[in-house]
């Protein structure tokens, strides 16, 4: 009788240990996947530079994704000396907004995104 009770307790302890091991392993694997898949990733598709009077404007076409990359959305960005002048992501299965038709003259830049036209003049501020 005692041997039978001991065998039942041993079986219960083994089941509990197996469950606890699987549970802890699941938490660890989930944390690793969450850290790895939760990071935002940028994938540069195309880069163009346009000279201005004070430097250059860079047009970037890229995808931004976090997690699984099945639904990565296209983005376009205009940058001037590390400053973001314009950034927009396309709507799902749409072709706009998408910065295009970029024209540069001296210190002025013009573009459109399929919804609006933009004009921007860049002048240096006098230093104190």
Image: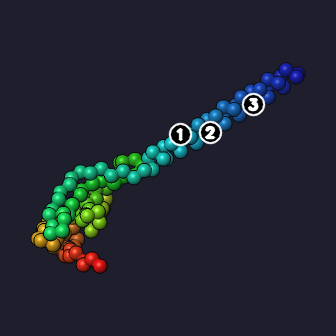
Left of 43 or right of it: where is 13? Answer: right
- Of residue 77 and residue 106, the one placed in the foreground of this image is 106
Task: Give whichever of discs 3 and 1 has the lower sequence position.
Answer: 3
In this rendering, the answer to whether 60 lies above or below 27 is below
Task: Name the residue nearer the viewer: 81 or 109.
Answer: 81
Q: Is label 3 or label 1 in front?
A: 1
Rounded to the nearest angstrom, the CA distance separating label 2 from label 3 is 16 Å
Q: Residue at x 56, y 40 (%)?
A: 28
- How far is the residue under mark 3 from the one under mark 1? 26 Å
Give the position of the N terminus as an image quadrant. Answer: top right
> Considering depth in this image, is 37 or 59 the residue closer to the camera?
59
Residue 49 visible (yes or no): yes
Q: Position of residue 103 (x, y in %)?
A: 12, 68
Q: Position of residue 56 (x, y in %)?
A: 18, 63
Task: Please tell me in which quadrant of the rendered image residue 83 appears.
Answer: bottom left
| Residue 15 image label | none
* Residue highlighted by disc 1: 29
User: What SS does tag 2 mark?
Assistant: helix
Residue at left offset 40%, top offset 47%: 68
Q: Residue 23: which numbered mark, if any?
A: 2
* Quadrant containing the C terminus in the rendered view: bottom left
The answer for how far apart the CA atoms under marks 1 and 2 are is: 10 Å
Left or right, 64 with reference to 25? left
Q: Decide: few, some or many residues near mark 1? Use Cα within 10 Å; few <14, some 14-19, many ≥20.
A: few
Tag 2 and tag 3, C-beta contact below 8 Å: no
> What residue is disc 3 on?
12
The image position of residue 87, as x and y in percent, is: 29, 65
- The mark nearer the N terminus, 2 or 3, is 3
Q: Nearer the viewer, mark 2 or mark 3?
A: 2
Q: Residue at 69% of width from left, 32% of height from top?
A: 17
**Sooner in the amino-acid sequence: mark 1 or mark 2:** 2
Q: Residues within 10 Å of mark 3 (few under 14, many from 20)?
A: few
């Amino acid at each position: 009788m005692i041997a039978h009770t001991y065998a039942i307790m041993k079986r219960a302890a083994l089941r509990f240990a197996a469950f606890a091991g699987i549970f802890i392993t699941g938490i660890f694997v989930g944390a690793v996947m969450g850290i790895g898949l939760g990071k935002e990733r940028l994938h540069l598709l195309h880069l163009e530079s346009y000279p201005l009077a004070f430097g250059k404007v860079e047009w970037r076409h890229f995808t931004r994704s976090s997690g699984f990359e099945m639904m990565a959305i296209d983005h376009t960005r205009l940058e001037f000396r590390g400053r973001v002048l314009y950034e927009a992501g396309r709507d799902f299965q749409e072709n706009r907004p998408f910065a295009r038709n970029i024209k540069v003259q001296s210190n002025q830049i013009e573009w459109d995104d399929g919804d609006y036209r933009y004009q921007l003049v860049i002048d240096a501020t006098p230093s104190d």
